[in-house]
Image (tube, rainbow, N blue to C red):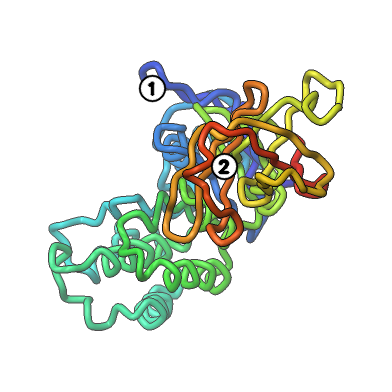
């Protein structure tokens, strides 16, 4: 039995709808919801937290919590903009959950959070005096002080200076383990997802496009929509490779396609095409080649392909190996 189980969740606002969401999340799992802005990531977090109406069932350890008010669900929520109370100083923000529930060993927990998140010098500050990173730490402390069984993080790194993101990602992993959490983290950032996630669900237009272990989802998309979202390039029918299956397509990484104007390639697959465009970018070229109406995008180091601009509109050879082909 899953720790948190979403069954056939539907939640609509205006014309947008979370459509038949089914997810199984295990205890102590770091689960990442990955999707573009407007895909329904935050709506789904709010639905889990009890802030939106929905049909379907949300089961926590087998018990249906779909109709419980948000404060009864033992869920901590850290919003993208942190949603701290501007009229309360840092210490009272962190302890806010004491207003509606009893916190066992509250003093010990508070001291631990303040020490671990390095908040001691901020306790008497006004919220408006804090930096983005300080607000984030306070928001996380407030969520953890309520002793949640599940922690929801809505784009937690979006307001953080990029130079601090690596250290904050490391901290999120440490928080997840230290406080024995099951974490659901929303992001549109592939790097965040890859580093943090035990499991990833990709959400596209209110529907789950794919779910699985982090490496499997990021490297082996199961359909074209997921592949395009993940940035896969050169998506073409497998008939190009001599595979007669009209339902299949394949993709090949632009960095793994070889180019020759001497027609001397020795790869598993070789094509001839017209060089449509060649753009110089620092140490490499971005090359666009038309192969019988299929437009390949290729990246080639400048030292490996001389005379790029001079050969525009000429016929050249491209190739790649079987091991570099991803079937979708």
- Disc 1 is placed on an element classified as strand
Q: Is residue 203 above or below residue 60?
A: above
Packing grade of label 2 (10 A; few <14, some 14-19, many >=20) is: many
* Circle on res. 13: 1
Q: Seen in the image, is 131 located left or right of residue 108?
A: left
Which quadrant of the figure contains the C terminus?
Answer: top right
Quick check: can you spot residue 39? yes
Q: Position of residue 290 (x, y in %)?
A: 60, 28
Residue drawn at x 30%, y 55% as measured from the top left = 82
Residue drawn at x 78%, y 20% as measured from the top left = 247
Q: Position of residue 202 (x, y in %)?
A: 58, 39
From the viewer's perspective, is the residue at label 2 or at label 1 nearer? 2
Q: Position of residue 286 (x, y in %)?
A: 50, 46
- Disc 2 is placed on an element classified as loop
Q: Position of residue 219 (x, y in %)?
A: 68, 48
Q: Seen in the image, is 130 located left or right of residue 28?
A: left
Residue drawn at x 60%, y 40% as measured from the top left = 232
**In-front residue for pair 126/205:** 205
The quadrant in which residue 197 appears is: bottom right
The quadrant in which residue 65 appears is: top right
Question: Total marks drawn?
Answer: 2
* Circle on res. 288: none
**In-front residue for pair 61/169:** 169
How far apart in space, not on screen, are marks 2 and 1 (Cα)?
Answer: 27 Å
What residue did someone put label 2 on? 230
Residue drawn at x 38%, y 54% as measured from the top left = 78
Packing grade of label 1 (10 A; few <14, some 14-19, many >=20) is: few
Quick check: can you spot residue 7? no
């Amino acid at each position: 039995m899953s720790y948190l189980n979403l069954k056939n969740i539907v939640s609509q606002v205006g014309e947008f709808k979370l459509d038949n969401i089914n997810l199984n999340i295990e205890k102590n799992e770091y689960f990442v919801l990955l999707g573009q802005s407007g895909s329904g990531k935050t709506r789904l977090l709010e639905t889990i937290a009890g802030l939106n109406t929905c049909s379907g069932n949300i089961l926590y350890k087998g018990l249906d919590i779909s109709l419980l008010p948000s404060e009864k669900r033992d869920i901590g929520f850290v919003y993208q903009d942190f949603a701290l109370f501007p009229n309360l100083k840092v210490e009272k923000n962190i302890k806010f959950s004491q207003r509606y529930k009893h916190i066992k060993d509250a003093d010990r927990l508070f001291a631990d959070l303040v020490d671990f998140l390095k908040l001691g010098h901020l306790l008497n500050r006004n919220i408006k005096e804090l930096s983005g990173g300080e607000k984030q730490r306070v928001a996380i402390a407030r969520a953890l002080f309520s002793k949640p069984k599940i922690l929801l993080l809505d784009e937690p790194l979006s307001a953080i200076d990029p130079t601090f993101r690596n250290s904050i990602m490391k901290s999120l992993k440490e928080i997840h383990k230290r406080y024995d959490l099951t974490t659901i983290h929303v992001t549109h950032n592939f790097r965040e997802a890859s580093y943090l996630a035990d499991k990833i669900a990709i959400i596209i237009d209110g529907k789950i496009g794919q779910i699985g272990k982090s490496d499997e989802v990021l490297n082996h998309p199961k359909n074209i929509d997921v592949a395009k979202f993940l940035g896969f390039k050169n998506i073409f029918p497998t008939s190009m490779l001599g595979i007669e299956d009209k339902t299949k397509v394949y993709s090949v990484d632009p960095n793994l396609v070889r180019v020759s104007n001497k027609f001397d390639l020795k790869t598993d697959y070789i094509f001839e095409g017209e060089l449509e465009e060649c753009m110089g970018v620092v140490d490499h070229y971005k090359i666009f080649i038309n192969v019988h109406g299929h437009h390949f995008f290729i990246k080639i180091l400048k030292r490996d392909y001389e005379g790029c601009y001079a050969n525009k509109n000429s016929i050249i050879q491209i190739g790649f190996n079987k091991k570099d082909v991803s079937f979708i």
